[in-house]
Image (tube, rainbow, N blue to C red):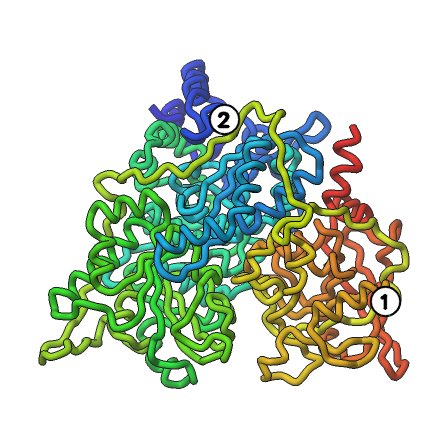
Amino acid sequence: MTLASYCTTRSTRLRRILCKRSLSTRSLATFASRVPISPLNPDSPLDYDRQISQLEAVKYGSQRPLTLTEKILYSHLYTSPDHAWNLDEIRRGETLLHLRPDRVACHDATATMALLQFISAGLPKVQIPTTVHSDHLVVSRNGAEEDLKRGRIEHQEVYAFLSSAAKKYGIGWWKPGAGIIHTTIFENYAFPGGLIIGTDSHTPNAGGMGMLGIGVGGSDAVDAMAGMPWELMCPEVVGVRLTGKLNGWASTKDIICKLAGILTVSGGKGKVIEFFGPGCASLGATAMATVCNMSAEIGSTSCILPYSDSMGRYLSATKRENIAQEANRYKDVLLTADEGSEHHYDDIIEIDLDTLEPHVNGPFTPDLSHPLSQLKEAVHNSNWPVNVSHAMVGSCTNSSYEDLYKTSQLVSQAKAAGLPRVRTPFMVSPGSEDIRATAEAEGILQSLRDAGAVILSNTCGPCVGQWDRTDVDVKGRERNTVVSSFNRNFVGRHDSNPETCSFVTSPEMVTAFAYAGRIDFNPISDSIAVDGSTSQLRFSPPTSVELPIAFTIGDNLYQAPVKNAAHLSVNIDPQSDRLQLLQPFKSWEADSVQDMPILIKVAGKCTTDHISPAGPWYKYRGHLEHISNNMLLAASNAFLPSGDSKLLGHTVHPLNSTTGVIHEVARDLRDRNVKWCIVGDWNYGEGSSREHAALEPRYLGGVAIVARSFARIHETNLKKQGMLPLTFADPVDYDKIVLGDRVTLVGVEEGEMQPGKQVGLRVQTKEGRVWEAKLNHSYSERQLKWLRAGSALNHIKETILSK
């Protein structure tokens, strides 16, 4: 029996359902309280009744229908006796929400710094379910077995730290090889109506299970782990209406690739993408997760789909049938948008699945979208190499059972036609140990090996730059083309080679390219010649099979939280070059923003991969001093000649006019006690959630970054670490900044800077001319306290722990 049955009609207004709840309804809550949010968290109950009560209180007096995004966010609001939330007082883009997430997740490359901050705060244990996933550090080179063996040895010190810290603070730890973070979360922790924050930008992956997932920096994670309110600016909600049904070569990857072309990499900032419409019901759960996962590439806060039968099927297949039963009970009142809520979306985008065609996006940015019918022309009108040097299926975006099964179907077609092996180097990564074991048991992986594929470990690998690539001259910056089912394709993303033209698309399209060997191949219209024969291979589109008959359980690579851990310790070798305890940043220094030199004027796209590159630098993610040696290593400087890739990561020393590596110049200025600032372009800091991109400039003596605009996560990370992110009120003022300028920030001292109040920029040229500009900021009263304390962590220790 559903909650809606307690109403005389299926109401669209939450209050009409809630007001008719009876003693029988309350018995549902009693039953639900015995269902945990995950089999691995038996002491954390799934409490839909509490969420509904919270919504009832927030919506009191209002008849407005709610979007699904609002239902999930507002049912997780942090309440206190002195503050009550009211729907009519919440303003999208203006109200700072204080939220209580259901859980926190970190991967190994961000968990080190997050845990070091947690340790620094002096907190005894986490207050909400938290997990750490070891998926980023393993380097792909020879295949799963050798890569994992080598990775466990190379990163033994970090893994020992993660294991001991997890035991000490009540955290679950997934060992290397267990799976990619978002796949593991989807299989074990994601549940409809939940809220998860994760120290990875692709945390919205959980939206495929009707759970709101939001990427954050480590300091934000520490807030939630400590049981404190986590802050989020109330997002706008963009509705995407899906009609029709996917057919032919079209897949859910094409939904988000098309959407990226519409909204661009910054079009989703401050917004949740909420799908609705009849087309949603036709999609499988992991296929929906693909869409939500890559929504990070449009800069969105998150992405969500309504609860559907396919989500219930997936929950049952992953031994969570009890959660599926509860979700079915509460579906209408909590897990889908209210009827009429589409009138309250900030914007609506229409996508007809019947006519959607395959898309291939890239290179160098995920929003350069090419419908397949237009790809050949785009390739021929560019200087992108036509021949594909590597094809890759995997990543947290497309490594499900359904993805691997589709890939194997095309391999079988090619073999039957007389093409036993791919013509392009081909790598495939399962998303988790259970997916690997299932695909192995069904013969899928062996068929891929027989076709020439290298099966990689259940880790991120090339998607995050962990690829020891030898087939092209990486150091010599050999220009080449790769195609993958990954989510991100920024400059140098996979192999540190800025001349690698990377395209992202669906796994089936990647497989077709692997056989054709050319990026201008169209499997709908083109054929492949069979060696030694006059016959031609024309692929047929693969069939979607969302789930196996049953998952095969792989090796157990999970370390459960330890309940009584007071006697345990976390040891860090003071001589370690991998791990370093954090020292608190100094509090705000008055007049530190006077007459500052500009370290760099960033030109064009500057992602967190440009600010703090990944790849070999993962080794130092737990050592702030060492990793600061990669600061802005891939950034373009408007103060230097453009077009010369050898000048990436360089700048002109403001004191002696010599050209040097940016981090070395910054360090020299810091050692001379010279405070400096950065000038940034549009959407500065887009991409990953890595807070190292904020920690490094702070550590090396930076005070402020003035940009045309910021990506959401990076702006918050800068605030958390005591940096001052400001934006030009008039973006044209960016163009006026020239080499030799020195800047002073006006109105930013304590008592001067206020929420919603502009501050000033005074620029003095090297010729002595002075001009001024207005700057905007997005600080709240609480966030200003972070700035004055020197960091959010300092503020926590000064206020929360002193009580």
Mark 1, Cα crowd under 10 Å, few <14 / some 14-19 / many 20+, is: some
Residue placed at 37% from the left, 55% from the top?
146
Q: Nearer the viewer, residue 674 or 709?
A: 674
Q: Where, quadrant-wise, is the C terminus in this rendering? A: top right
Residue placed at 51% from the left, 75% from the top?
498
Residue placed at 43% from the left, 42% from the top?
185
Task: Give, as a three-letter code, the residue at label 1.
Answer: Thr
Q: Can you tell which quarter of the image residue 675 is in?
A: bottom right
Q: Can you tell which quarter of the image residue 335 is in?
A: top left
Q: Which residue is disc 1 drawn over?
A: 744
Of the two numbered discs 2 and 1 on the same chain, state the one appearing first in sequence: 2
Using the rendered image of the protein, determine whether residue 70 is visible from the camera's viewpoint.
no
638, above or below 433, in the image: below
Provide the secondary structure element on which disc 2 rests: loop
Q: Tag count in the figure?
A: 2
Q: Which residue is disc 2 drawn over?
A: 44
Q: Nearer the viewer, residue 58 or 326?
A: 326
**Residue 758: x, y in percent?**
80, 59
522, above or below 87, in the image: below
Q: Where, quadrant-wise, is the N terminus in this rendering? A: top left
In the shown orientation, is residue 563 left or right of residue 316?
right
Provide the secondary structure element on which disc 1 rests: strand
The disc label shown at residue 217, or none: none
Using the rendered image of the protein, determine whether residue 207 is visible from the camera's viewpoint.
yes
**Residue 186: x, y in percent?**
40, 42
Mark 2, Cα crowd under 10 Å, few <14 / some 14-19 / many 20+, is: some
In the shown orientation, is residue 755 left or right of residue 186?
right
Q: Nearer the viewer, residue 479 or 467?
A: 467
Residue placed at 72% from the left, 61% from the top?
697
Task: Give, as a three-letter code, the residue at label 2.
Answer: Ser
